[in-house]
Amino acid sequence: MNHEEIKRYFENSPPPREVRLTEWANITDTQVFLRSCYSTIKNFNGPTDRCPAWWHLRDFYLLIKRTAPQENAPSEQSIEGEEAVSTEDTAQKEIKT
């Protein structure tokens, strides 16, 4: 996935205003963060994969994709929760035997 595809993704499904990217990086305005990344990538002289803004944008995208289904689709969350419970039950049964 390249930065243009990520840009289209965020245009169609905007992220929340504030996001905790890492322990030490809290994004207080994601739209400003995204504009900064897009601008820096556009003006970077060199391969995109060497641009620090590309890596920040990619990490942000992966974080949002990882957390979005839990917030936006409760039915998917319950399915995932059921799978987790059944796996836990199976592990407990194996321990008891």
Image (tube, rainbow, N blue to C red):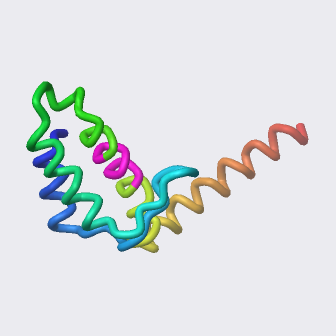
Nearest to the observer: residue 31 or residue 15? 31
The residue drawn where x is 10% and y is 30% is: 45
Q: Quadrant of residue 85?
A: bottom right
Q: Is residue 10 above or below residue 4?
A: below
Residue at the extreme right:
96
Q: Between 62 and 52, which is closer to the camera in this rendering?
A: 52
Q: Is residue 21 above or below residue 69?
A: above
Q: Position of residue 95 (x, y in %)?
A: 86, 38
Q: Is residue 58 magenta?
A: yes
Tell me if residue 56 is in the magenta stretch: no
Task: Please identify the quadrant where the N terminus is shown.
Answer: top left
Q: Is residue 46 above or below residue 41?
A: above
| Residue 89 placement (x, y as % from top left) | 74, 51
Left/right placement of residue 68 relative to residue 81 reads: left
**Residue at 23 percent of width and 68 percent of height:** 13
The residue shown at (66%, 53%) is: 86
Quarter of the image for residue 54 reads top left
Residue 81, x across and y down, in percent = 58, 62
Range covered by the magenta-colored residues: 57-63
Position of residue 46 in the picture relative to residue 79 (left or right): left
Q: Main secondary structure of the magenta part?
A: helix
In this view, the residue in front, 92 or 67, is: 67
Q: Quadrant of residue 40?
A: top left
How many labels, in total?
0
Q: Position of residue 2 (x, y in %)?
A: 16, 40
Seen at 59% across and 61% down, the residue is 82
Q: Is residue 56 left or right of residue 85?
A: left
Viewer-proximal residue among 81 and 72: 72
Locate the C terminus by quadrant: top right
